[in-house]
Amino acid sequence: MSALATSGVAVDLSELIALRLRARRLARPATRVSGIHAATNASRFRGRGVDYAESRIYQPGDDIRQMDWRVTARSGKPHTKLFEEEREQSTLLIVDENPSLRFGTRVRYKSVQAARAAALIAWTAARNGDRVGALGFGGGIDAEVKPGGGARGALRVLRALAEWDAAAQRDVHTPLSQALLRARRLARPGCRVIVLSDGFSADDDAQGPLSLLADHCDVAAIVLEDTLELAAPAPGRYALRGASGRVLLDFAAARTRNEWQGWFRQQRAHLLDLLAKRALRWVALQTHEDPDAAVARVLGTDVRDRIVQAQTA
């Protein structure tokens, strides 16, 4: 099958790799750091690092080279300096591969758009000096990529996204709760966890593991949507094919139009309710849009978000 025939229907690895250039606009401003494992995220751990944090009374085992002689002279008691240690941040992408993602009427499938957004996040993490990994679920996919750093770590995620998309089955459904339970093994405290889903896989059992993840990680979501899911098509009779076979729907009837919109709204509502209960941020991404703005919002790198944060600080 030609590339033109699969455009927008299947994940294209070359397209995911090309998104690397667009990550420049989303990366954090560079900071000058020292050491072998330089990064741009301040850690809550104390140690010999980059930025001075505080001075404390000398304790046996403290490095004498870090003595704070000014405080020592002023207080009459020996003090040593403590520094904020900078550490790499890890990002874990939870990518929904369920059959409902194999749908799209504007430019591409939701599954392809999810992969594009995930790739952009992976490249942004690599550019920030962070580690990135991924977990795929649904469609018979039960695989994961452990977080890795640099371009090599991002490329491992991108290859997995393309492989999972090609291998996903159209008749195998996996609930979100199972993916969240698996994510707890990979997401260490302080990890950024981003769920990419259309919400159709959200189930009641997801509340527990989502709350446990949110207790120790920065959890957010990108919710995939298609224009036809948000509003019924123009009045007329349409032949559709679903899990139960081919059906004919009359969208000239007001009841059909209302039920159509209500059904899709209900499918997304469960995921949005789960996120709202923990006040977790999320952003909608439609199939025809560029993912840059949505990724910027979910990563907190959007300029408008920075202004709001500064005003509320």
Image (tube, rainbow, N blue to C red):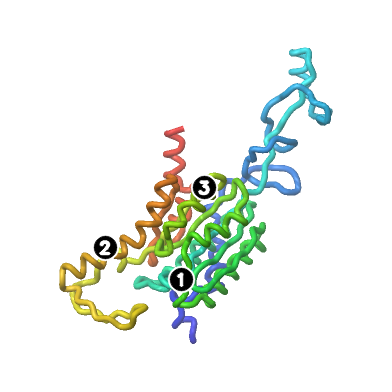
Which residue sits at x=59%, y=49%?
191
Which residue sits at x=44%, y=48%?
281
What's the amino acid at mark 3?
Answer: Ala
In the image, 98: left or right of 61? left
- Which residue is denoted by mark 1 in the rendering? 173
In the image, 291: left or right of 131? left
> Farthest residue toward the left?
253
- Which of pointers 3 and 2 lies earlier in the amino acid sequence? 3
Q: Which mark identifies residue 214? A: 3
On the image, the x and y values in percent for residue 50 come to 70, 37
On the image, the x and y values in percent for residue 115 come to 50, 66
- Which of pointers 1 and 2 lies earlier in the amino acid sequence? 1
C-alpha distance separating marks 3 and 2 = 29 Å
Q: Which mark identifies residue 262? A: 2
Q: Nearer the viewer, residue 95 or 140?
A: 140
Q: Is residue 162 above or below residue 79?
A: below
Which residue sits at x=63%, y=40%?
42
C-alpha distance separating marks 1 and 3 = 25 Å
C-alpha distance separating marks 1 and 2 = 22 Å
Can residue 147 be seen in the rendering of this structure? yes
On the image, the x and y values in percent for residue 273 come to 38, 52
Q: Nearer the viewer, residue 134 or 75?
A: 134
- Which mark is in front, 1 or 2? 1
